[in-house]
Image (spheres, rainbow, N blue to C red):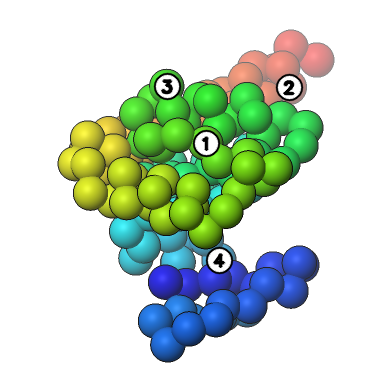
Amino acid sequence: GVVQRGWGGLAAAGDDMLTIGEVPHSALFPRMAAVVHHAGAGTTAAGLRAGVPAVPLPVQFDEGFWAERLIRLGVAPCAVPLRRLTAESLAAALVRATRHPVHRERAEALGVRIRAEDGVAPVLAAVEGLAGAV
């Protein structure tokens, strides 16, 4: 597994784990079998764009909403709230995320759709429309 150190200074323990520093999610996530993350809006979007299953660990604010959304979309088997996080609960969620093909299939399909979107064109057209109205 790969642990991104982040602002929390996380570190991996074990011969089968690697701790890394700052790496863009767009470079890292597509190479993962699944992404375990806090379920913030930006990280959730990056995981969906990458097309990989998720294991959300919501902590606060809107993270519970995004974790539930990942489950409803079928890309996450469950959420593991931080207050219930144990090695066993995380391992069980990772096994479900990586061994049940439905999560990979849904994640890949959503990733294709998201990467195909042109989010800039409609915004540009709206701005140009507003500029023309002035």
The residue that mark 1 highlights is 79
Q: Is 62 positioned to the left or the right of 57 in the image?
A: right
Q: Which mark is residue 10?
A: none
Q: Which residue is mark 3?
A: 72
Upstream in the sequence, badge 2 or badge 3?
3
Rendered location of residue 122, percent (x, y): 52, 24
Callout 4: 10 Å neighbours few (<14), some, many (20+)?
Answer: few
Which element carries disc 2, helix, strand or loop? Answer: helix
Query: To which residue does mark 2 refer?
Result: 131
Q: In the image, what residue type sits under mark 2? A: Ala
- Helix, strand or loop under label 3: helix
Compared with 1, 86 (above or below) is above
The image shows residue 101 at horizontal and vertical percentages of 19, 41
Nearest to viewer (mark 2 / mark 3)? 3
Crowding at mark 1 (Cα within 10 Å: few <14, some 14-19, many 20+):
many
User: Can you tell which quarter of the image residue 58 is in?
Assistant: top right
In this rendering, is residue 79 above or below 24?
above
Residue type at mark 1 is: Ala
Alpha carbon distance from label 1 to label 2:
44 Å
User: On the image, numbered disc 4 is attached to which residue?
Assistant: 24
Q: Position of residue 134 (x, y in %)?
A: 80, 15
- Residue drawn at the location 34% of the way across and 65% of the way down: 31
Give the foreground label among 1 and 2. Answer: 1
The disc, 4 or 2, on the residue closer to the chain's N-terminal end is 4
Q: Residues within 10 Å of mark 3 (few under 14, many from 20)?
A: few
| Residue type at the position of mark 3 | Arg
Compute the Cα span from label 4 to label 1.
24 Å
Counting residues from the N terminus, which is met first, the one under dot 4 or under dot 1?
Answer: 4
Relative depth, front residue between 40 and 18: 18
- Could you tell me which residue is drawn at 42 percent across and 87 percent down? 15
